[in-house]
């Protein structure tokens, strides 16, 4: 304990150094990634419209290399900031309770909120795998990766059962992450709300998370059941 | 009724501390948890042993002195109840209760169930006040305040600063406490004048004290004996965000500890204590 007074920074922290500032950054970057999830899902659902429309949509996304990389950069910066803030806050939280409880019961928090530190890294691993499989094509179990023939890549990729299983599990965890993150971002960004409003926000977060994840999961399931060939 | 109390015993802040078990016979179900400890302490004194140290003052749930973990829950299993108001009828005959002090880096242990909560005092000192010019007190109702606003401010002002929010938080964050103090002043016109500086100073102090960060999971409000809502944390973040986006003439002030009980030094006056 004697070290606590010495190694704590004694000067007032600036916005990024403060825990509150980092959480506001996490809320904003989380929101950007949420917007991406909506757009990405709407695009992905075109897979049901057949190979032609799905492939032409994929081609449309590549209509300008510069714009594509600007959009990608925004997403990458959001992901990086989100992770840096989380890691720094997690390190701080670990230090904030040097001696743990012999017994500790959770009485008022959701399962999703207590497992953010698990769902986050697993979703990150999933995103890396996902990019390697469908964007870069370096990992593509099953058949050959054909650049440009997105429909072929998706269908043959998901025909491998363990790829689909891994996607479904990771996406469910993303759903858990969203179930807490979607309402928590209002809290972190600082939108005061009454208790009924807070409950409504939590309900909406659950509904939106379920809809998004159901949409995403439907694709590997449709491939596995033979609906998409 | 009989109870088995497993209590954290720690001689002083440098002692490592360990659990000790005590069997307490003849517990009256109408007793409060603190009265149960009083009974135990009487027998310990009779046996020539050191009594269990715990903080208490009003024993009617409004001073914020008492508080410890009972079976892993801050202030025990009853909602909106401090340990001084928690009656023993809520426990079963023969039950084992594990009593542990609040555990947080910002709350260094002093003895047994007593921790040093002066980090809260310093957060208040940093900005939890309204500056008032001295003179005659103004008339009570010169500034009209809506009933809604008054109730809202009162809900936040109900915070007694017991520290249960920090104890219950898996991150040992003091967001609910700081949020309550920022909200109850900022909601009223008298407090709005210093709203920006208050948010900057109190948030800065909270960060200096080594509390964790808020992950909005809500354990704090569940443990709070005054049921302070999570909304106060959103209010704090809003005030802090707004204040951060403006330019300021005044520096953000932080308060340094004047004495350090926890590291054994005596009065060590810092010449820059409030700079």
Image: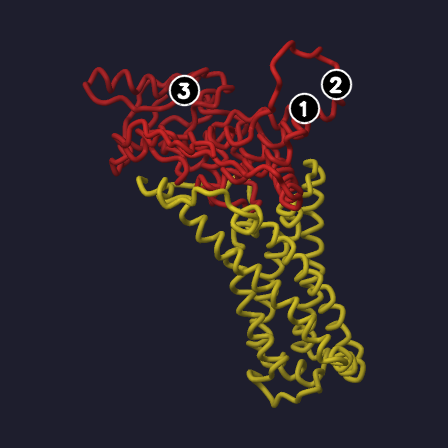
Chain colours: A yellow, B red
Asked which secondary structure carries label 2, the reply is loop
Indicate which disc, 1 or 3, sits on the residue closer to the N terminus.
Answer: 3
- Distance, label 2 to label 1, CA atoms, is 9 Å
Q: Secondary structure at mark 1?
A: helix
- The residue singled out by tag 2 in the image is B143
Crowd rating for badge 1 (residues with CA inside 10 Å; few <14, some 14–19, many 20+): some
| A96 to B159, vertically: above or below | below
Disc 2: CA contacts within 10 A as few (<14), some (14-19) or many (>=20): few
Label 1, on which residue?
Answer: B190
Same chain for the residues under marks 2 and 1 in the image: yes
Query: What residue do we see at 65% from left, 47% from top?
Result: A189
Chain name for mark 2: B
- Contact between labelled residues 3 and 1, with CB atoms less than 8 Å apart: no
Say which of marks 1 and 3 sits in front: 1
User: Marks 3 and 2: in contact by CB < 8 Å?
Assistant: no
- Give residue B110's mark: none
Q: Residue visible at 63% across and 28% down?
A: B184
Residue annotated with mark 3: B56
Mark 3 neighbour class, 10 Å CA radius: few under 14, some 14 to 19, many 20 or more: some
What is the C-alpha distance between the residues marked 2 and 3?
37 Å
In this view, the residue in front, A106 or A57, is A57
The lab-note entry on whether marks 1 and 3 share a chain reads: yes
Q: Nearer the viewer, residue A227 or B241?
A: B241
In the rendered image, residue B42, in percent from the top left (x then y), is placed at 28, 15
């Amino acid at each position: 304990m004697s070290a606590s007074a010495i190694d704590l920074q004694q000067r007032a922290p600036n916005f990024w150094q403060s825990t509150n500032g980092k959480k506001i950054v996490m809320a904003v970057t989380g929101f950007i990634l949420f917007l991406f999830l909506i757009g990405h899902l709407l695009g992905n659902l075109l897979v049901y419209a057949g190979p032609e429309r799905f492939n032409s949509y994929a081609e449309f996304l590549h209509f300008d290399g510069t714009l594509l990389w600007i959009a990608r950069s925004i997403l990458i910066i959001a992901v990086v900031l989100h992770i840096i803030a989380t890691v720094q806050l997690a390190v701080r939280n670990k230090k904030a309770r040097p001696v743990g409880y012999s017994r500790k019961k959770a009485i008022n928090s959701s399962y999703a909120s207590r497992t953010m530190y698990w769902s986050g890294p697993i979703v990150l691993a999933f995103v890396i795998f996902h990019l390697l499989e469908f964007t870069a094509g370096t990992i593509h179990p099953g058949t050959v990766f054909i650049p440009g023939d997105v429909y072929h890549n998706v269908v043959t990729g998901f025909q491998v059962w363990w790829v689909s299983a891994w996607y479904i599990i990771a996406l469910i965890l993303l759903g858990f992450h969203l179930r807490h993150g979607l309402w928590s971002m209002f809290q972190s960004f600082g939108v005061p709300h009454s208790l009924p409003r807070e409950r409504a926000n939590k309900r909406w977060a659950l509904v939106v998370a379920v809809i998004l994840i159901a949409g995403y999961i439907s694709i590997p399931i449709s491939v596995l059941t033979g609906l998409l060939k | 009724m009989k109870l088995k109390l497993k209590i954290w015993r720690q001689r002083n802040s440098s002692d490592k501390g360990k659990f000790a078990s005590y069997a307490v016979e003849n517990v009256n179900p109408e007793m409060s948890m603190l009265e149960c400890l009083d009974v135990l302490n009487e027998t310990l004194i009779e046996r020539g042993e050191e009594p269990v140290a715990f903080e208490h003052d009003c024993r009617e749930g409004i001073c914020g002195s008492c508080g410890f973990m009972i079976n892993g829950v801050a202030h025990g299993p009853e909602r909106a109840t401090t340990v001084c108001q928690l009656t023993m009828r809520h426990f079963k005959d023969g039950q084992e209760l594990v009593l542990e002090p609040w555990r947080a880096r910002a709350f260094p242990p002093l003895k047994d169930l007593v921790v040093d909560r002066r980090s809260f005092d310093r957060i208040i000192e940093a900005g939890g006040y309204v500056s008032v010019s001295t003179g005659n007190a103004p008339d009570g109702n010169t500034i009209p305040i809506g009933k809604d606003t008054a109730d809202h401010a009162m809900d936040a002002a109900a915070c007694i600063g017991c520290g249960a929010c920090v104890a219950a938080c898996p991150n040992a964050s003091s967001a609910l406490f700081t949020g309550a103090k920022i909200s109850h002043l900022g909601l009223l016109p008298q407090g709005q004048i210093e709203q920006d500086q208050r948010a900057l100073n109190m948030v800065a102090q909270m960060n200096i004290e080594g509390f964790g960060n808020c992950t909005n999971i809500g354990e704090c409000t569940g443990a709070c004996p005054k049921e302070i809502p999570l909304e106060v944390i959103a209010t704090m973040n809003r005030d802090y965000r707004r204040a951060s986006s403006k330019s300021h003439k005044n520096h953000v002030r932080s308060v340094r500890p004047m004495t350090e009980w926890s590291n054994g030094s005596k009065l060590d006056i810092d010449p820059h204590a409030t700079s």
